[in-house]
Image (tube, rainbow, N blue to C red):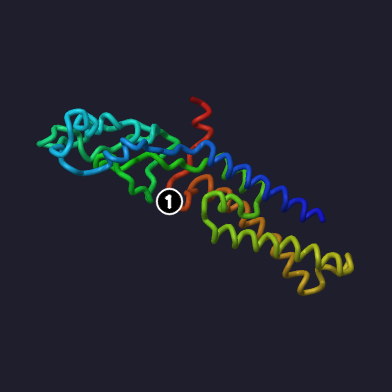
Amino acid sequence: MVFKKFLYICIFIIIVIHNFELITSSTTDLSAEEQILITSSTTTDFSAEEQILLDPIFFQNEICSFNGEIDYANADIDPVTKYYINLKCICNQEYTNDPKQTLKINGNLIQCSYQKKRLFITLFLSIFIPVGFDHFYLGNNIAFALIFLLFCFTVIGNMYRFAISPEDDYLKNKINLVFFVFIFIFIFVWIGNVFFIKFYGKDINGNELVDDFDLLLK
Protein backbone atom coordinates (compact mmCIF):
# COMPACT_ATOMS: atom_id res chain seq x y z
CA MET A 1 0.00 0.00 0.00
CA VAL A 2 2.83 2.39 0.86
CA PHE A 3 4.66 1.54 -2.36
CA LYS A 4 1.50 2.17 -4.36
CA LYS A 5 1.08 5.64 -2.85
CA PHE A 6 4.76 6.37 -3.49
CA LEU A 7 4.35 5.37 -7.14
CA TYR A 8 1.33 7.69 -7.53
CA ILE A 9 3.33 10.58 -6.06
CA CYS A 10 6.22 9.93 -8.47
CA ILE A 11 3.87 9.86 -11.47
CA PHE A 12 2.28 13.13 -10.31
CA ILE A 13 5.70 14.80 -10.08
CA ILE A 14 6.61 13.67 -13.60
CA ILE A 15 3.33 15.06 -14.99
CA VAL A 16 3.93 18.42 -13.28
CA ILE A 17 7.49 18.63 -14.64
CA HIS A 18 6.36 17.67 -18.14
CA ASN A 19 3.65 20.35 -18.15
CA PHE A 20 6.16 22.89 -16.84
CA GLU A 21 8.44 22.14 -19.78
CA LEU A 22 5.56 22.61 -22.23
CA ILE A 23 4.56 25.93 -20.68
CA THR A 24 8.07 27.38 -20.53
CA SER A 25 9.26 26.06 -23.90
CA SER A 26 9.41 28.54 -26.75
CA THR A 27 7.50 28.00 -29.98
CA THR A 28 7.74 29.86 -33.26
CA ASP A 29 4.39 30.44 -34.97
CA LEU A 30 4.64 32.16 -38.33
CA SER A 31 1.95 34.38 -39.79
CA ALA A 32 0.47 33.83 -43.24
CA GLU A 33 2.74 36.49 -44.76
CA GLU A 34 5.79 34.92 -43.16
CA GLN A 35 4.88 31.47 -44.43
CA ILE A 36 4.75 32.84 -47.99
CA LEU A 37 8.26 34.22 -47.57
CA ILE A 38 9.70 30.89 -46.47
CA THR A 39 11.31 30.33 -49.82
CA SER A 40 14.64 30.36 -51.60
CA SER A 41 13.25 32.08 -54.71
CA THR A 42 15.02 35.06 -56.26
CA THR A 43 13.73 38.56 -55.67
CA THR A 44 12.61 39.04 -59.29
CA ASP A 45 9.20 37.48 -58.56
CA PHE A 46 8.27 39.98 -55.82
CA SER A 47 7.14 43.55 -55.60
CA ALA A 48 9.24 46.27 -53.97
CA GLU A 49 7.40 45.88 -50.68
CA GLU A 50 7.80 42.09 -50.75
CA GLN A 51 11.50 42.38 -51.60
CA ILE A 52 12.00 44.36 -48.40
CA LEU A 53 10.43 41.50 -46.46
CA LEU A 54 12.80 39.05 -48.14
CA ASP A 55 15.68 40.55 -46.18
CA PRO A 56 16.47 38.02 -43.39
CA ILE A 57 17.14 40.92 -41.03
CA PHE A 58 13.39 41.57 -41.09
CA PHE A 59 12.90 38.12 -39.53
CA GLN A 60 16.02 38.00 -37.36
CA ASN A 61 14.00 37.36 -34.19
CA GLU A 62 11.96 34.63 -35.87
CA ILE A 63 15.07 32.96 -37.29
CA CYS A 64 16.51 32.77 -33.76
CA SER A 65 13.09 31.89 -32.26
CA PHE A 66 13.36 34.97 -30.00
CA ASN A 67 15.93 32.96 -28.02
CA GLY A 68 19.19 34.34 -29.36
CA GLU A 69 20.97 36.79 -31.63
CA ILE A 70 22.24 36.45 -35.19
CA ASP A 71 26.00 36.27 -35.59
CA TYR A 72 26.37 38.81 -38.40
CA ALA A 73 30.15 38.83 -38.09
CA ASN A 74 30.35 35.33 -39.58
CA ALA A 75 27.39 35.60 -41.99
CA ASP A 76 27.71 35.52 -45.77
CA ILE A 77 26.26 38.14 -48.14
CA ASP A 78 24.48 37.23 -51.35
CA PRO A 79 26.32 39.01 -54.22
CA VAL A 80 23.05 39.53 -56.13
CA THR A 81 20.52 40.55 -53.48
CA LYS A 82 23.10 41.95 -51.04
CA TYR A 83 21.17 40.21 -48.27
CA TYR A 84 22.70 38.13 -45.49
CA ILE A 85 22.57 34.38 -46.16
CA ASN A 86 23.46 31.25 -44.19
CA LEU A 87 22.75 33.05 -40.95
CA LYS A 88 23.80 31.45 -37.68
CA CYS A 89 22.31 32.31 -34.30
CA ILE A 90 24.09 32.63 -30.98
CA CYS A 91 21.50 31.00 -28.73
CA ASN A 92 20.75 31.98 -25.16
CA GLN A 93 22.18 29.62 -22.56
CA GLU A 94 18.87 27.82 -22.07
CA TYR A 95 18.32 27.05 -25.77
CA THR A 96 20.01 25.28 -28.65
CA ASN A 97 19.18 24.17 -32.18
CA ASP A 98 16.55 21.49 -32.69
CA PRO A 99 18.14 18.62 -34.67
CA LYS A 100 14.71 17.83 -36.13
CA GLN A 101 14.01 21.38 -37.30
CA THR A 102 13.45 21.67 -41.07
CA LEU A 103 11.45 24.90 -41.36
CA LYS A 104 13.28 27.78 -43.04
CA ILE A 105 12.69 31.52 -43.36
CA ASN A 106 14.03 32.95 -46.63
CA GLY A 107 16.43 30.05 -46.90
CA ASN A 108 17.66 30.33 -43.31
CA LEU A 109 16.95 27.44 -40.96
CA ILE A 110 15.04 28.36 -37.79
CA GLN A 111 17.41 28.03 -34.84
CA CYS A 112 17.46 28.18 -31.03
CA SER A 113 14.02 26.56 -30.87
CA TYR A 114 14.98 23.67 -28.58
CA GLN A 115 14.87 24.27 -24.83
CA LYS A 116 17.58 22.37 -23.00
CA LYS A 117 16.73 20.10 -20.10
CA ARG A 118 17.58 21.46 -16.67
CA LEU A 119 20.31 20.05 -14.47
CA PHE A 120 18.53 20.91 -11.22
CA ILE A 121 15.39 18.96 -12.14
CA THR A 122 17.45 16.00 -13.36
CA LEU A 123 19.59 15.89 -10.20
CA PHE A 124 16.53 16.27 -7.98
CA LEU A 125 14.89 13.26 -9.61
CA SER A 126 18.08 11.16 -9.55
CA ILE A 127 18.76 11.89 -5.87
CA PHE A 128 15.31 11.91 -4.25
CA ILE A 129 13.33 9.66 -6.62
CA PRO A 130 15.97 7.16 -7.78
CA VAL A 131 13.68 5.02 -9.88
CA GLY A 132 14.82 6.23 -13.32
CA PHE A 133 12.54 9.25 -13.67
CA ASP A 134 15.59 11.43 -14.34
CA HIS A 135 16.29 9.46 -17.51
CA PHE A 136 12.60 9.55 -18.42
CA TYR A 137 12.78 13.36 -18.15
CA LEU A 138 15.83 13.38 -20.47
CA GLY A 139 14.09 11.09 -22.96
CA ASN A 140 16.36 8.09 -22.31
CA ASN A 141 13.57 5.54 -22.08
CA ILE A 142 15.81 2.46 -22.10
CA ALA A 143 17.85 3.68 -19.12
CA PHE A 144 14.61 4.62 -17.36
CA ALA A 145 13.16 1.13 -17.89
CA LEU A 146 16.31 -0.64 -16.64
CA ILE A 147 16.62 1.43 -13.46
CA PHE A 148 12.89 1.21 -12.76
CA LEU A 149 12.92 -2.57 -13.13
CA LEU A 150 15.98 -2.81 -10.87
CA PHE A 151 14.20 -0.72 -8.24
CA CYS A 152 11.02 -2.81 -8.41
CA PHE A 153 12.94 -6.09 -8.33
CA THR A 154 15.03 -4.97 -5.33
CA VAL A 155 12.37 -3.31 -3.20
CA ILE A 156 9.37 -5.51 -3.91
CA GLY A 157 11.47 -8.66 -3.89
CA ASN A 158 13.00 -7.93 -0.49
CA MET A 159 9.65 -6.86 0.97
CA TYR A 160 8.01 -10.07 -0.20
CA ARG A 161 10.83 -12.35 0.92
CA PHE A 162 11.05 -10.62 4.29
CA ALA A 163 7.29 -11.03 4.79
CA ILE A 164 7.32 -14.78 4.17
CA SER A 165 10.64 -15.59 5.85
CA PRO A 166 11.50 -15.83 9.55
CA GLU A 167 13.31 -12.67 10.65
CA ASP A 168 16.18 -14.51 12.34
CA ASP A 169 16.86 -16.80 9.37
CA TYR A 170 16.35 -14.29 6.55
CA LEU A 171 19.90 -14.29 5.19
CA LYS A 172 20.32 -18.05 5.59
CA ASN A 173 18.03 -18.60 2.64
CA LYS A 174 19.92 -18.37 -0.67
CA ILE A 175 17.04 -16.68 -2.49
CA ASN A 176 16.77 -14.09 0.27
CA LEU A 177 20.51 -13.52 0.09
CA VAL A 178 20.29 -12.79 -3.65
CA PHE A 179 17.59 -10.18 -3.10
CA PHE A 180 19.61 -8.69 -0.24
CA VAL A 181 22.70 -8.35 -2.48
CA PHE A 182 20.58 -6.46 -4.99
CA ILE A 183 20.09 -3.76 -2.35
CA PHE A 184 23.80 -2.94 -2.57
CA ILE A 185 23.71 -3.16 -6.37
CA PHE A 186 20.84 -0.66 -6.45
CA ILE A 187 22.64 1.70 -4.06
CA PHE A 188 25.77 1.52 -6.24
CA VAL A 189 23.71 2.29 -9.37
CA TRP A 190 21.91 5.11 -7.53
CA ILE A 191 25.11 6.88 -6.44
CA GLY A 192 26.85 6.26 -9.76
CA ASN A 193 23.88 7.62 -11.66
CA VAL A 194 23.91 10.86 -9.63
CA PHE A 195 27.59 11.47 -10.44
CA PHE A 196 27.05 10.55 -14.09
CA ILE A 197 24.16 13.03 -14.41
CA LYS A 198 26.15 15.78 -12.70
CA PHE A 199 29.27 15.54 -14.86
CA TYR A 200 28.21 13.79 -18.08
CA GLY A 201 24.43 14.14 -18.27
CA LYS A 202 22.89 14.82 -21.69
CA ASP A 203 19.40 14.51 -23.11
CA ILE A 204 18.27 12.08 -25.79
CA ASN A 205 19.52 14.45 -28.54
CA GLY A 206 22.99 14.70 -27.05
CA ASN A 207 22.52 18.25 -25.75
CA GLU A 208 24.17 19.23 -22.50
CA LEU A 209 21.97 20.17 -19.55
CA VAL A 210 21.40 23.76 -18.46
CA ASP A 211 23.21 24.61 -15.26
CA ASP A 212 20.28 26.05 -13.27
CA PHE A 213 22.53 27.15 -10.45
CA ASP A 214 24.49 29.31 -12.87
CA LEU A 215 21.28 30.86 -14.18
CA LEU A 216 20.07 31.73 -10.70
CA LEU A 217 23.18 33.86 -10.13
CA LYS A 218 22.37 36.12 -13.07
Q: Is residue 138 left or right of residue 69?
A: right
Residue drawn at x 34%, y 34% is 62
Q: Position of residue 210 (x, y in %)?
A: 48, 39
Q: Residues within 10 Å of mark 1 (few under 14, many from 20)?
A: few
Residue drawn at x 72%, y 51% is 8
Of residues 167 and 72, the one drawn nearer to the viewer in this rendering: 72
Residue 181 is drawn in which quadrant?
Answer: bottom right
Q: Position of residue 58 (x, y in %)?
A: 27, 29
The relative height of residue 210 versus residue 183 in the rendered view (above or below) is above
Which quarter of the figure is the N terminus placed in? bottom right
Task: Say what secondary structure mark 1 lies in.
Answer: loop
Q: Position of residue 118 (x, y in %)?
A: 52, 40
Residue that lies at the very extreme toward the top in this rendered image: 218
Residue 40 is drawn in which quadrant?
Answer: top left
Name the residue that disc number 1 marks: 206
Q: Is residue 4 left or right of residue 30?
A: right
Residue 76 is drawn in which quadrant?
Answer: top left
Q: Position of residue 148 (x, y in %)?
A: 64, 59
Q: Is residue 51 left or right of residue 115?
A: left
Residue drawn at x 86%, y 69% is 164
Q: Is residue 64 left or right of residue 178?
A: left
The relative height of residue 118 versus residue 136 in the rendered view (above or below) is above
The relative height of residue 57 versus residue 206 in the rendered view (above or below) is above
Of residues 89 and 24, the one drawn nearer to the viewer in this rendering: 24
Residue that lies at the very extreme toward the left in this rendered image: 80
Three-letter code for the amino acid on which mark 1 is drawn: Gly
